[in-house]
Image: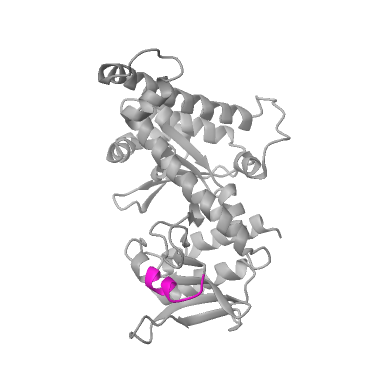
Amino acid sequence: MDFNEKINQFINRIEDIKDTLTTEESTKTALVMPFFQLLDYDVFNPMEFVPEYTADIGVKKGEKVDYAIIRNNKPVMIIEAKPVSDKLKKHDTQLMRYFSVTEAKFAILTNGINYKFFTDLEQPNMMDEKPFLEIDLLNINDNEIIQLKQFAKNTFNLETISSTASNLKYIDCINDRLKKESKNPSDDFVRFMINDFYVGVKNKNVVDKFRPIVKKALNQFTADFMNEKIQIALGENTTDTTSISNIEKAETSKLITEDELEALEMIRSILENVVNKEDITYKSTKSYFGINYKDDSRNWICRLFLTKKGKKGIHIPDEDKSPIKFDFDEIEDLKDIKPMLEDIVKRYL
């Protein structure tokens, strides 16, 4: 069984048991330890995987982080686990304290489903405030699986992961900037975009004139790019892809089905009076077909489960983004929850 198959098997296990886990200890036993076993660590070897690792802070003794992974008698990763129901919003400071007093290069905060990976890119021995990698195992894509595999025991390389962490962090920053510019292009961005073809002073009136044009062009480019991806996925584009990098191959390796494409168009049709069609994007994962707002999986609209056996299900987020589950028979039935879908999208506007 290869790594991808192990991940998919583990995801199925999470789906089966997550609702039964009510405490931090049950989360550790049922999800966290098996996850690191999946990465080939011997969780029962105290020379490799240490529970309750001492992280004393100054005069404050007895401080312990949940787990530490040891290589060459030194900690390389520390792990702080929380209950599966925890949103992981209030514990970064605690982990930051632990990180500063150990030799570990990486810190992981998890609730057994979501994993936040931190390091010290900004200042040596001081954990960055933002993680360089965030993975939701129930919403994982092939590119994230590739990143995750680097943390496995047999492939772990400190220098390689440090380099990857730097790239991921700044790629994420650039993506965030592009998302902001696509919603409301800044003056500097507008000037940059028109610089090659507009001759003359780029004063406020000129910038204001071009702002909606730049916004429309950027959104149109995104829509065209997504449509091209769909064409490739459906096999309608015969472009030679032999030179695509491994990560790009992974991102496009899961073909979307006819049912998924039909569902995407149905959701876009349902929401056409609320948002632009191109703002409704998709993310195809191993376990479900996700519909998101503006390519942001944090702003998810629904998750579709369209199995070959004909059974269909949909999850929609409540106000805390916990899933509400419905079953349905045909794609047309999605029209029945139109008001709910519209309310969800309006939260993101």
Which quarter of the rendered picture does the N terminus lie within?
bottom right
Where, by quadrant of the figure, is residue 11 drawn? bottom right
Q: Which residues are magenta?
A: 95-104
Residue 28 visible somewhere in the drawing: yes
Residue 328 visible somewhere in the drawing: no
Picture layout, residue 325 above or below residue 249: below
**Residue 252, horizontal then vertical, whole percent:** 61, 38
Instruction: State the residue in front, 71 or 142.
Output: 71
- Which residue ends up furthest to the front in the rendered image? 201
User: In percent of the image, x 40 and y 56: which residue is there?
Assistant: 130
Where, by quadrant of the figure, is residue 75 drawn? bottom right
Instruction: State the residue in front, 35 or 342.
Output: 35
**Residue 303, horizontal then vertical, whole percent:** 45, 44
Is residue 134 toward the left or the right of residue 271 in the image?
Answer: right
- Which residue ends up furthest to the left in the rendered image? 205
**Residue 8, horizontal then vertical, whole percent:** 60, 56
Q: Residue 102 colored magenta?
A: yes
Q: Residue 114 colored magenta?
A: no
Is residue 70 toward the left or the right of residue 56 in the image?
Answer: right
User: In percent of the image, x 30 and y 53: which residue is there?
Assistant: 320
Instruction: State the residue in front, 221 or 200.
Output: 200
Where, by quadrant of the figure, is residue 149 drawn? bottom right
**Residue 187, horizontal then vertical, whole percent:** 31, 27
User: In percent of the image, x 62 and y 76: which residue is there?
Assistant: 42
Main SS of residues in magenta? helix
Is residue 347 toward the left or the right of residue 142 in the image?
Answer: left
Query: Which colour scheme appears in the figure?
Result: one colour
Q: In this figure, what is the number of numbered marks?
A: 0
Instruction: State the residue in front, 17 or 254.
Output: 254
Which quarter of the rendered picture does the C terminus lie within?
top left
